[in-house]
């Protein structure tokens, strides 16, 4: 079954935020457009009504009959407009044209005529021309009303409508982009604690199961608490595993040592020489089993978090002690084990670091072959103290070096009967001290160089 690519939480949140935005903004833009358009229409209608009121002010009632006189100058003033044509008409109560454009008579609203002081607005057509019309009733005495009509074409209104539409659309689009960017930024900022929590979890392993103590938003506190409970359970399980491993290794080591001693004594006693090969094989197998038990015990100690790895030590002293120990051991024929030591103050646990060096030397002796030259070095450089074991054996191909430091893994060129734990234990001890173990090429010619690099002691800056 093919896994589908999982969607981004950030994109999902942004999508859900964008959805109501895409729905609400057009509705808000339409509402705003209508409001602005109505306001502009009202303002322009008031201009027409002002013209009608001006005409109403010119009506004079004499002997009960309304009269109006508009001079040419005033007529031009009433009709002046830069964009539209303006028309007007003044009617007597009986419908007689008193002044203006008689063609507007057919534009009067039906029914009935406006009463005095009341106005009516509407759209009309005159000779295929669309007009905006206002009709105003004016008191002409005797309880009767004169009707004043003022109309204009729609060029100004259409232009204003297009301008309002463009401005609303432009501002709406700008607001949408701004809100989208603000939403994207806000989501990224809101997810930052989750990203930081993920980064912190990425660096956790069985050697670092301390509780998470970062200050997180309230919504992430239950998740943090769940992880802390998981770390607690993992720590208990890992502790139980280490205790079992240490107990098993400890219980195995004593009988295996006794068995090895008994086999060696049996080989010294008079016996049928035909059983010598069998006794040799038994001794070899027991020796290998005892070595494996010792490695398992070292592995348990390397993973024990209660061990203090901040003691003041010197890698030269550890190498010297290992050299004295190896001086009393029988080395394979022709193996030359040498030491080039310099002061290398560091922080760590002496027993664990000696176990690390023991595994590196044992690996070099086991796999470099007869006649090998093995050199142990230590010192300090700009990054901190270091310790390395170099041999001139067949080495490990670069592509296999990372795998060789995993438990129970051996290089393809490895010979002998090793268990594949030596380099894994050394790598674990290095990580336990905050350092790293690297498998490098020998300085000259074939071979392998295992280098331990440790951080400088807290009280001593890097050289």
Image (cartoon, rainbow, N blue to C red):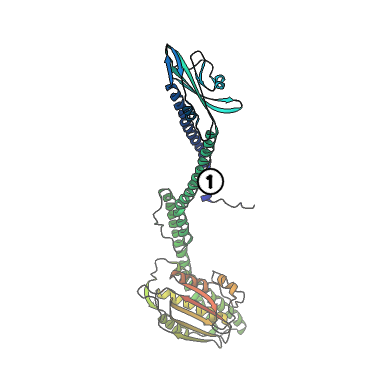
Q: Nearer the viewer, residue 453 or 187?
A: 187
Q: Nearer the viewer, residue 205 or 133?
A: 133
Residue sitting farthest toward the left: 459
Could you classify mark 1 by the number of other residues whose Cα lies within 10 Å: few (under 14), some (14-19), or many (20 or more)?
Answer: some
Q: Position of residue 361 (x, y in %)?
A: 50, 80
Count of picture labels = 1
Q: Position of residue 233 (x, y in %)?
A: 45, 56
Residue 407 to residue 155: above or below: below
Residue 12 visible at all: yes
Q: Residue at x 41, y 53 (%)?
A: 216
Residue 151 to residue 97: above or below: below
Q: Position of residue 350 (x, y in %)?
A: 40, 76
Residue 297 visible at all: no
Report the side of 213 relative to 414 (left or right). left
Residue 105 to residue 400: above or below: above
Residue sitting farthest toward the front: 72
Q: Residue at x 47, y 78 (%)?
A: 357
Query: Mark 1 sits on what residue?
Result: 15
Q: Nearer the viewer, residue 303 or 170?
A: 170
Report the side of 64 relative to 127 (left or right). left
Quadrant of the rendered image containing residue 159: top right
Q: Nearer the viewer, residue 204 or 162?
A: 162
Q: Position of residue 54 (x, y in %)?
A: 44, 25
Secondary structure at badge 1 equals helix
Question: What is the quadrant of the C terminus in the image?
Answer: bottom left
């Amino acid at each position: 079954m093919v896994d589908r690519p999982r969607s981004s939480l950030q994109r999902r949140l942004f999508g859900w935020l964008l959805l109501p935005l895409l729905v609400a903004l057009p509705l808000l833009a339409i509402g705003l457009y209508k409001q602005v358009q109505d306001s502009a229409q009202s303002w322009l209608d008031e201009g027409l009504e002002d013209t009608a009121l001006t005409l109403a002010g010119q009506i004079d009632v004499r002997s009960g009959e309304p009269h109006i006189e508009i001079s040419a100058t005033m007529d031009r003033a009433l009709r002046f407009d830069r964009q539209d044509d303006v028309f007007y008409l003044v009617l007597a109560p009986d419908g007689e044209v008193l002044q203006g454009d008689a063609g507007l008579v057919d534009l009067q609203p039906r029914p009935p005529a406006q009463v005095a002081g009341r106005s009516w607005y509407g759209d009309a057509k005159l000779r295929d021309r669309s007009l905006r019309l206002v009709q105003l009733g004016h008191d002409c005495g005797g309880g009767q009303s004169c009707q004043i009509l003022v109309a204009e074409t729609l060029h100004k209104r259409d232009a204003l409508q297009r301008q309002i539409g463009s401005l609303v659309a432009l501002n709406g689009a700008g607001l949408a982009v701004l809100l989208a960017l603000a939403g994207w930024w806000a989501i990224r900022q809101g997810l930052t604690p989750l990203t930081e929590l993920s980064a912190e979890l990425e660096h956790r392993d069985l050697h670092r199961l301390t509780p998470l103590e970062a200050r997180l938003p309230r919504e992430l506190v239950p998740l943090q608490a769940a992880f802390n409970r998981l770390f607690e359970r993992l720590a208990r399980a890992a502790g139980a595993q280490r205790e079992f491993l240490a107990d098993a290794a400890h219980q195995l080591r004593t009988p295996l040592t006794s068995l090895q001693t008994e086999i060696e004594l049996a080989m010294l006693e008079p016996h049928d020489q035909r059983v010598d090969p069998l006794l040799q094989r038994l001794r070899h197998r027991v020796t290998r089993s005892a070595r494996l038990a010792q490695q398992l015990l070292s592995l348990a100690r390397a993973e024990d978090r209660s061990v203090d790895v901040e003691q003041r030590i010197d890698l030269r002293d550890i190498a010297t002690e290992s050299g004295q120990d190896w001086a009393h051991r029988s080395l394979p024929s022709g193996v030359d084990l040498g030491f080039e030591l310099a002061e290398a103050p560091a922080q760590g646990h002496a027993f664990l670091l000696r176990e690390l060096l023991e595994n590196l030397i044992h690996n070099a002796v086991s796999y470099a072959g007869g006649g090998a030259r093995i050199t142990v070095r230590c010192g300090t450089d700009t990054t901190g103290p270091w310790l390395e074991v170099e041999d001139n054996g067949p080495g490990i191909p670069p592509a296999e070096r990372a795998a060789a430091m995993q438990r129970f893994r051996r290089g393809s060129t490895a010979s002998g009967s090793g268990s594949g734990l030596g380099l894994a234990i050394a790598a674990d001890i290095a990580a336990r001290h905050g350092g790293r173990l690297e498998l490098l090429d020998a300085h000259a010619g074939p071979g392998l160089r295992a280098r331990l690099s440790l951080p400088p002691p807290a009280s001593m800056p890097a050289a």
